[in-house]
Image (cartoon, helix red, strand yellow):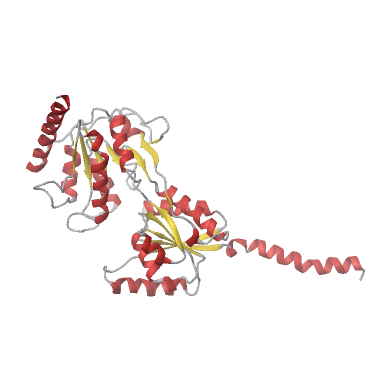
């Protein structure tokens, strides 16, 4: 055999190996575990997952896990730990993404499930510095709901607004959001009133779905709704996005502004919001930097930026026009009929509206004096 033929013969195994590696390339991609705080897939968390997958491209594959606990005690989450340990079966991810506070707490407590894997949080407020310092190899993307931006937007789009109705549940996170609404309303209190149904004097038990529906249907024509959060009713029962979306679709009588896109496309106007897909794409960029060699604990946590997004049909229904730089989806297909405002239900709500009008008159006279 000639030297030329011998060289070609020796190169054949190398070419075969390269060809085999090319075929197995996707299987050799890094694996990212996406832990969801919720128990099941939802349109919202799957949009986040889609953004993460899109942002990672062929660099990494994404495996999802849902923290479905049969109860809220320690034993319930230990059961999840055992099930997840069996599911992973020694398959250790190169990075773990925790969506929400429950997933972040779970991943920190049961870090032995994914030893040496950096932890990236998203879809939650920035953790306390003490929590981050104890977390070890972790970083993330904080979510600062665009409260002031939406309050300013309401009055920019409808200068004649006289009442802002902020919808919230009884969770601690909602309490913080309501404080921020009160601060953001400061410049507008000479012309408008803010109300928190379910948290007013004499009516401070929170909201259930029927009462929330009556509230949405009763907001006057010069009012606007700012939906903060409504993940559970006043008795602590969880409220699915689909239930809230149906209520907006059927009962809303005034423009509803959103800080997130969980129920966008159901009749709400929109506004400044943090979208699930953008959260996923932004998280992917952090994961890629880590896979490229950056240490997670040396990366400064970033914030997911809100975008202006509006529903064209909802805008047309209320005679509104989106800012020039905003994204508008769902343009109206034909004539959009206005929904009549239903009679106000509940003595406290009626007194509240009357009080709002009286306060507006009082403040107007005071500032003129």
User: Residue reaching furthest left?
Assistant: 347
The residue at the point 25 percent across, 34 percent down is 187
Q: In terms of depth relative to the viewer, which is nearer, 130 or 351? A: 130
Residue 314 picture quarter: top left
283, 9: nearer the viewer: 283
Tell me how many marks there are. 0
On screen, residue 80 above or below 183: below
Q: Which quarter of the figure is the N terminus placed in?
A: bottom right
Residue 255 position within the rendered picture, expressed as x and y whole percent measured from the top left: 26, 35
Judge whether 122 appears above or below 167 on screen.
below
Picture residue at 59% right of the left edge, 61% below the top: 26
Q: How far across and down, in percent of the image, does residue 282 sit?
A: 47, 50
User: In the image, 39: left or right of 284?
Assistant: left
- Position of residue 80 measured from the top left corner of the image (x, y, whole percent): 35, 71
Q: If the image is split into quadrants, where does the C terminus sit?
A: top left
Occupied quadrant, residue 313: top left
Query: Which residue lies most toward the top here?
Result: 368
Rendered view: 81 above or below 336: below
Residue drawn at the location 55% of the way across and 63% of the way down: 30
Q: Is residue 3 left or right of residue 310?
A: right
Residue 338 shows in this picture: yes
Residue 343 visible, this orientation: no
- In the rendered image, the residue lying farthest to the right is 2
Residue 366, position as x, y percentages in the image: 14, 28
């Amino acid at each position: 055999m000639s030297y030329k033929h011998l060289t070609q013969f020796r190169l054949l195994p190398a070419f075969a190996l390269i060809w085999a590696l090319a075929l197995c390339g996707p299987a050799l991609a890094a694996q990212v575990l996406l832990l969801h705080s919720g128990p099941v897939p939802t349109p919202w968390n799957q949009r986040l997952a889609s953004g993460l997958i899109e942002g990672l491209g062929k660099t990494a594959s994404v495996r999802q896990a849902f923290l479905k606990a049969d109860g809220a005690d320690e034993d319930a989450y230990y059961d999840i730990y055992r099930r997840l340990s069996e599911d992973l079966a020694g398959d250790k991810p190169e990075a773990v993404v925790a969506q929400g506070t429950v997933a972040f707490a779970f991943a920190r407590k049961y870090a032995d499930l994914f030893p040496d894997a950096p932890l990236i949080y998203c879809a939650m407020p920035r953790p306390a510095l003490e929590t981050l310092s104890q977390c070890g190899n972790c970083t993330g993307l904080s979510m600062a709901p665009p409260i002031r931006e939406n309050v300013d937007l309401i009055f920019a789009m409808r200068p004649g607004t006289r009442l802002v109705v902020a919808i919230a549940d009884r969770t601690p996170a909602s309490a913080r959001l309501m404080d921020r609404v009160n601060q953001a309303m400061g410049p507008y209190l000479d012309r408008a009133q803010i109300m928190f149904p379910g948290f007013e004097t004499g009516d401070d038990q929170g909201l259930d779905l029927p009462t929330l529906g009556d509230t949405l249907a009763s907001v006057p024509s010069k009012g606007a709704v700012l939906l903060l959060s409504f993940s559970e009713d006043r008795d602590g029962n969880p409220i699915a996005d689909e239930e809230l979306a149906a209520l907006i679709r059927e009962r809303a009588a005034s423009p509803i502004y959103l800080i997130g896109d969980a129920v966008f496309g159901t009749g709400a106007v929109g506004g400044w919001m943090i979208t699930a897909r953008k959260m996923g794409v932004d998280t992917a960029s952090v994961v890629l930097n880590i896979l490229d060699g950056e240490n997670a604990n040396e990366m400064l946590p970033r914030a997911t930026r809100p975008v202006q997004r509006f529903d064209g049909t909802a805008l047309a229904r209320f005679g509104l026009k989106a800012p020039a730089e905003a994204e508008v989806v769902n343009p109206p297909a034909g004539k959009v009929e206005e929904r009549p405002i239903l009679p106000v239900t509940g003595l406290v709500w009626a007194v509240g509206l009357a009080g709002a009008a009286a306060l507006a008159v009082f403040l107007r006279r005071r500032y003129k004096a």
